[in-house]
Image (spheres, grey):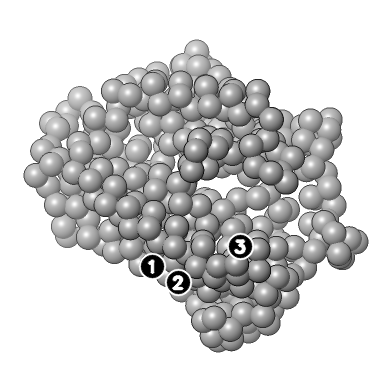
Amino acid sequence: MPDIKKTKRKSISGGKIDITFLSFTLILLTIGLVMLFSASYAYSLEYYGNSYKFITRQAILGAFGVLVMLGVSKIDYHFWRKFAWVIFGIAIIMLILLLALPPMVSGMDVKRWLVIGPINFQPSEVAKFAIVLLFSSLIAANYKQMKSLGFILFLVGILGLTCGLIVLEPHLSATVLVFCIGAALMFIGGLPKRYVFGGLGIGVAGVALLIISGAVSYGSDRIKYWLDPWADASGKGFQTIQSLLAIGSGGILGRGIGQSRQKYLWVPEPHNDFIFSIVCEELGLIGATVIILLFCLLVWRGFTIAMHAPDKFGALMAIGLTFQVGLQAMLNIWVVTNTIPNTGISLPFFSYGGTSLVILLAEMGIVLSVSRGANIEKT
């Protein structure tokens, strides 16, 4: 990673965006929209009387998100650094407001969504970006202090406050995601290994304590039915069982696009967190592997951009944003395949959620902005 003091800022607006990273982003978005329509039309027709309800909104916001991504890519990424504390403050206020208000989504007993008119979004999405932005700014400006216990505790306090508010929603998967993003940026920024392992130990112990103490009581049930979903096959284990049936019935080649059987009201809300099970059923092992490979290539290219970024701030931003996508995709796939307990986490570019998709594409635009100042023509 280049030394920020020895690196002259390059002209960002005049540089070319990384076409490889852009291509992987657009390919994942396109496949995601196709699979969302295939997974959602039966559910949408049954509950809303319109097969196109989900795909119409997602496609419109996806197209808008691409325009936002391209627009953001033309903005010098250093611009966002000026608002690091402001965006973090907004995220914290929204998380506090979320906890103070009753659940805004009918039928849900958790507080994860803020509803403002037609806009429905999770403040944890803003919190993810806020942590990436703030940590990138603070670490880049104080990288020589990364061995200072005082500065480390300052960063840990920021991360702890954010994770603490998210876990109270409760939203364990988002908590784990935000914690891992912050920990990864601290490690890459120069955090001594002894603190890394100590922090991971404290984090794991903290989650275990929350579950055991009952602060997140739903966690113990999810572990129970993760280990044996058949213990409540028609209740809390139903979604996992139907997901595994969908994956297994897809075989090597899949049933073909549009040919899933489990999406016909067997897999609950197949257009959301468990859309990958429909992907596996329709595209098979080969298709699912290709999609996983595309996510891996997106992360690889994002890290390549980071390695050639003109300064530490740009490098940390590119790493943090692409690491977020890769980790979230991995956690979602692990949940759908019952590798880890069901934690309620979406699959980037695939799961329904227009507002979160726009935010995600805007974040990819920042990575593209970093690429404008990078020198990776020969990479």
Instruction: Determine which of the numbered discs, if any, sits on residue 48 in the image.
Output: 3
Where is residue 378 shown, x and y percent of the image?
17, 60
- Name the element at disc 1: helix
- Does residue 373 appear in the picture of this structure? yes
Instruction: Determine which of the numbered discs, if any, sits on residue 308 in the image.
Output: none
- Name the element at disc 3: helix
Q: Are marks 2 and 1 in contact (CB under 8 Å)?
A: yes
Residue at (48%, 55%) from the top-left corner? 348
For residue 316, above or below residue 239 = above
Where is residue 156 shown, x and y percent of the image?
54, 23
Q: Is residue 277 left or right of residue 188?
A: right
Residue at (84%, 30%) from the top-left corner? 213
The amino acid type of the residue labelled 1 equals Thr
Where is residue 51 shown, x and y percent of the image?
54, 70
Furthest residue in direction top, as rendered: 150
- Name the element at disc 2: helix
Residue at (68%, 49%) from the top-left corner? 343
The amino acid type of the residue labelled 2 equals Val
The residue under label 1 is 30
Where is residue 261 shown, x and y percent of the image?
67, 80
How would you rate the neighbour count of disc 2 (Cα within 10 Å): few for under 14, some for 14-19, many for 20 or more? Answer: some
Q: CA distance from mark 2 to mark 1?
A: 6 Å
First in sequence, mark 3 or 2: give its number.
2
Q: Are marks 3 and 2 in contact (CB under 8 Å)?
A: no
The amino acid type of the residue labelled 3 equals Tyr
Residue at (33%, 24%) from the top-left corner? 83
- Does residue 176 appear in the picture of this structure? no
